[in-house]
Image (cartoon, rainbow, N blue to C red):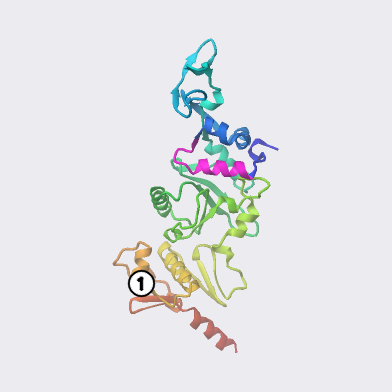
Amino acid sequence: MTRSLSKIDERAARLFVSIVETEEARIAGAVLSDYHAASAVPLIGAGLLVPDGPVPAATSLTDHDDEPVRLEWLPEHQAYGYFSPAAGWVTVEENRLQVYRIDSLAFLQRVAARLDLPVKARPAERISRILWELGDVRLPSRGGRVPVWFARRLTNRDVWRQVVAYLRGRPPVDFRVVVTTSAIHGLAEAELSRHQIIALDDLVDHSARLIIEPTYLAAQLKTGAASRAADPVRHAAGFRHVWLGEREFKFSGDKRRQIVEYLFNAWEDGMESVSTEVMFADLEFKSSSRMRDIFKDHEDWRDLIEATGGSCRLRIRELLQDQIIHTA
């Protein structure tokens, strides 16, 4: 078994994720030694936790209870230590002084080890120590490749704003997956059109922690080809195509597809119609935007979208009923 695929149990994986989600993504060697000794071994062995330099201070192990003491280097001992009135010179083990940090590259290579990525694909950092692009992944039972990214600390409000701003400024052609070690409950995913945020723990084969299982990722996807061909109302990835029975509508242009997606989601949530003004605000369009301008030159958009009296909706019910009448 290669180093990147070495076995890591649930407890070690949980510890590692908790370190990933801290601001500095570091942990003191003394903490590992005192509380997580068994879990630290496979994480260090897999190269996921690496030394980040010693700290010349420690907690007294003898007569000062839990008080911090400053350490000195003693050449004859070739070690750090301190003088205790009760015990004399006390040597502190090197591993207790060490600070460990996550090796982001080793971690992301492990995460993506089973994914079918282009040969030259490598994790690319997009926001320093926060967001990485893993690459376009080919998944079972899906035609095109799926862009997969990784993010951490999404529950931090400032980090979330940074990630949303970055991804919005670089919208995907169809849709994008963001895998994260953060808790996803409560994240405002609606702020990221055509993105799906998935917890890493929902994607791993529990016999090999911290590694995405491609079949699990394919099963989790809600966007694009997740709309089944047998459904009378379905869409292609990124809402480039929408089908209602035998009727197909095609949409180019980012704003057009965002509107169709917004109205489709509203329909799925049981909303008969939505305020056009509110929709534009949610999508961050200019307040002066007008539906007829956005869909200018689209020959049949009014067949699918009804926009009257300051509200709009998809004419799904009418279109399906028309097809039933014509085929009766």
**Residue 231 seen from this side:** yes
At x 35% / y 69%, what residue is drawn? 278
The residues colored magenta run: 10-26
**Depicted 56 relative to depicted 242: above or below:** above
Q: Is residue 255 magenta?
A: no
Q: What amino acid is found at the position of numbered circle 1 in the picture? A: Thr
Instruction: Give the class, few, some or many, for how many residues have Cα within 10 Å of label 1's Cα (few <14, many ≥20).
Output: many
**Viewer-proximal residue among 2 and 294:** 2
**Image x and y of residue 78, in percent:** 54, 14
Q: Is residue 22 magenta?
A: yes
**Image x and y of residue 198, in percent:** 54, 55
Q: Secondary structure at mark 1?
A: helix
**Image x and y of residue 289, in percent:** 32, 67
Q: Which residue is mark 1?
A: 276
At x 47% / y 69%, what residue is drawn? 265
Q: Is residue 314 left or right of residue 122?
A: left
Q: How many marks?
A: 1
**Residue 121 seen from this side:** no
Task: Give the quarter of the figure containing the C terminus.
Answer: bottom right
**Viewer-proximal residue among 86 and 221:** 86
Judged from this view, the residue extending furthest toward the left is 288
Q: Is residue 109 left or right of residue 84?
A: right
Dominant SS type (magenta): helix
**Viewer-proximal residue among 294 and 237:** 237
Q: Is residue 85 left or right of residue 138?
A: left
